[in-house]
Amino acid sequence: MKYKPLDLVGVKTYPLAERSNKMVMKRDASAGVRPGMSVDELLRSMPAQLGSQNLLAVIDAVVAARAAGKPVVMAMGGHVIKCGLQPVLKNLIEAGAITAFAVNGSVAIHDYELSLIGETSEDVGKVLHCGLFGMAEETGRDINRALREGVARGIGFGEAVGQFILDNGNPYKDWSLLATCREHDLPLTVHVAIGTDIVHQHPTADGAVIGQASYTDFRIFASVISELGDGGVYLNVGSAVLLPEVFLKALSIVQNLGHHVDNFTTANFDMQQHYRPLQNVVKRPTSGKSKGYTVTGHHEIMIPLLAAGILDRLGSVPTTTGG
């Protein structure tokens, strides 16, 4: 052979004590767990490393934002609602921890169905090939009606559907995030792409109405984002494309109009980290004095844990109602 094993006799070494290490037990290790720990004690017992460090930083940022009266915005995709997390989100609303929501069209659909029958999420594979996927009568009929009535009154998508749920007296309205936001006068904006939602398949759908309702919400969302600077928090939960793009455009608009939007915190929560949330939420918007974090895990685990940590901390921290 042309090559012979390399002789390692001359390799230089140095004492382990001189090496800089990323993990130091006295500084970074878990404090251990014990029966009866509070949520705050459990979270603080986690190793000061990687994911747990990011989660704790986000909790700190949310608590600090609310103490300072700055907005905390949660953007999310439909899976969060399909997991049945509305009660957790409602807890955060009632504690004053979240000041605005931005969602895609599937959130509004699943939320509406839950408010009406207490169930949602059809088995697509069973009905797709017979042409029945997305064709439930009440869902398309009611949401499209709510949008027509809302646009006629000059209001946006989220407010229109949330108010319709309340006015209609849907049996499970207490489980609805949209209705809860209306009751608390909290902005919840819905951002849709025509053709992505089942209600667009129905004969009651009107593209001009859907577009107007969602465009009104985009402008409301931009207004919310204009107040994010100097301490606000923006959380993207489970939206891989649509809402990260909407956030970037809204941020560009408010900067263009002269609003100072820097020195805030962003975080992306998802089961895996995708390109657009990483670029449009975690990295690009935080290139100044802001900070961006990633927290990877299942929504049905991570969001209750996030909420529990925030609520445990807010119990001893004054929350300003503004923002």
Image (spheres, rainbow, N blue to C red):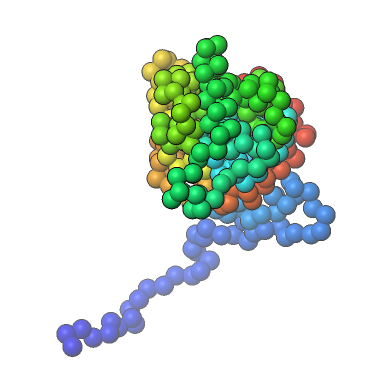
Position of the C terminus, as image quadrant, is top right
Q: Residue at the top extreme? A: 153
Residue 67 visible in the shown view: no
Decide which of 290, 239 is in the foreground and name it. 239
Q: Residue at x 44, y 34 (%)?
A: 201
Q: Residue at the left extreme? A: 2
Q: Where residue 134 appears, x then y in whole percent? A: 50, 40
Position of the N terminus, as image quadrant, is bottom left
Question: Is 51 positioned to the left or the right of 194 in the image?
Answer: right
Q: Residue at x 65, y 42 (%)?
A: 119
Question: Is 169 positioned to the left or the right of 302 in the image?
Answer: right
Residue 97 sits in which quadrant? top right
Q: Residue at x 47, y 36 (%)?
A: 197
Q: Residue at x 73, y 52 (%)?
A: 42
Residue 162, compared with residue 128, is above or below; it is above
Decide which of 13, 269 is in the foreground and name it. 269
